Image (spheres, rainbow, N blue to C red):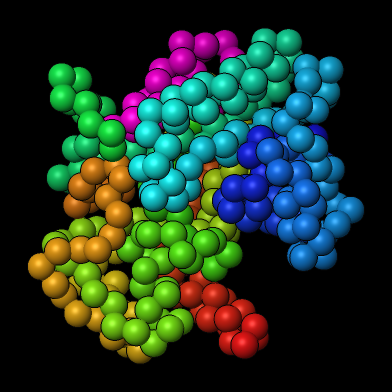
Amino acid sequence: MRIAFLGATSQIAKDLALSFCEQSGHELVLYARRPEAVSQWLASVDLPKRCTVHEFSAFTVTENFDAIFNFVGVGNPAHAASMGASIFDLTLQFDELALNYLRKHTGCRYIFLSSGAAYGSNFNTPVDATSSATIAINHLQPQDWYSVAKLHAECRHRSLADMSIVDIRIFNYFSHTQDMEARFLITDIARSIRDGTVFKTSAEYMARDFIGPDDFYQLINSILNSPCMNAVLDCYSKAPIDKPTLLAAMQVHFDLRYELVKSSSGINATGNKPYYYSVNKRAAEFGYSPALSSLECIEKELRMFMKENDRGK
């Protein structure tokens, strides 16, 4: 396959590109606003000639692709908060870029990286196949912009039923390669382990389901190896994990010291989500079977992160 990546500076895009390069013969063409950064990254992982790198302006309908991946978006909650409503324009701009290509190349597949945030704000229980998106339409807040932008894109995609478009809702992704300075619960924990500091977090209960590079790559392959379809799939691992279990495991396996406090210092850019994960297992219909649980994924990626951190000292 010849595959285009839109937004190749995204860390999840880099992880997937690395998996493709190591485990497949697909030809990858990586598009980015900062192509020099992508080229530098490829050199750092000893793949300087494995992929072609271009600016976004080089992406045209005259190219020949079997699949397009759209990674353009925001992976950092602090960035999401600072972007505000401009996330609408960003999402629409690059979504339309891909859709215009599909209008000319009807056999091309389009995989759009959506988010669990598309469900809105109601995560008092895990979402499932019967869940509805919940948006406070009369009281929209800045933390809603990201959610609504993803929901709007998904609605457009479902309206184009004749096009091969798969939206993948990512809830929680963790990789040893990601920016550990970003303000997520798991990255805050990773920094505390790395720096030997006390991790202070709220006593509020929460549960999450983390997917890592290996299972994400398996999910992508299950889509590419299936007949063309117009659908949306939720990401999931073998099993979710709640905060008390996660903290206890990190204490045992990584000597994490933590303290429960009244309020959290984390950034809440997309609203409060006690159970931010899905039990909608539709992806299994296409052959996806996750190999790791959330805890297994976190432990594996954290060990790799700590090993690389020790090597860099």
From the viewer's perspective, tell me whether residue 128 is left or right of residue 171: left
Query: Which of the 4 quarters of the picture holds residue 137?
Result: top left
Residue at image point 66% right, 35% down: 6
Residue at image point 74% right, 15% down: 105
Residue 134 position in % (x across, y down): 21, 28
**200, 293: nearer the viewer:** 200
Query: Which of the 4 quarters of the picture holds residue 153?
Result: top left
The answer to whether 96 is drawn above or below residue 237 in the figure is above
Residue at image point 36% right, 42% down: 81
The magenta span reads 144-166
Residue at image point 52% right, 11% down: 160
Quarter of the image with the N terminus in it: top right
Quarter of the image with the C terminus in it: bottom right
Q: Residue furthest right?
A: 49
From the viewer's perspective, tell me whether residue 142 is left or right of residue 195: left
The answer to whether 214 is drawn above or below residue 102 in the figure is below
**305, 236: nearer the viewer:** 305
Residue 118 position in % (x across, y down): 34, 32
Residue 100 appears in the figure: yes
Taking the magenta stretch, the answer to whether it contains residue 150 is yes
Residue 118 appears in the figure: no
Query: Which of the 4 quarters of the picture holds residue 82?
Result: top left
The answer to whether 163 is drawn above or below residue 44 in the figure is above
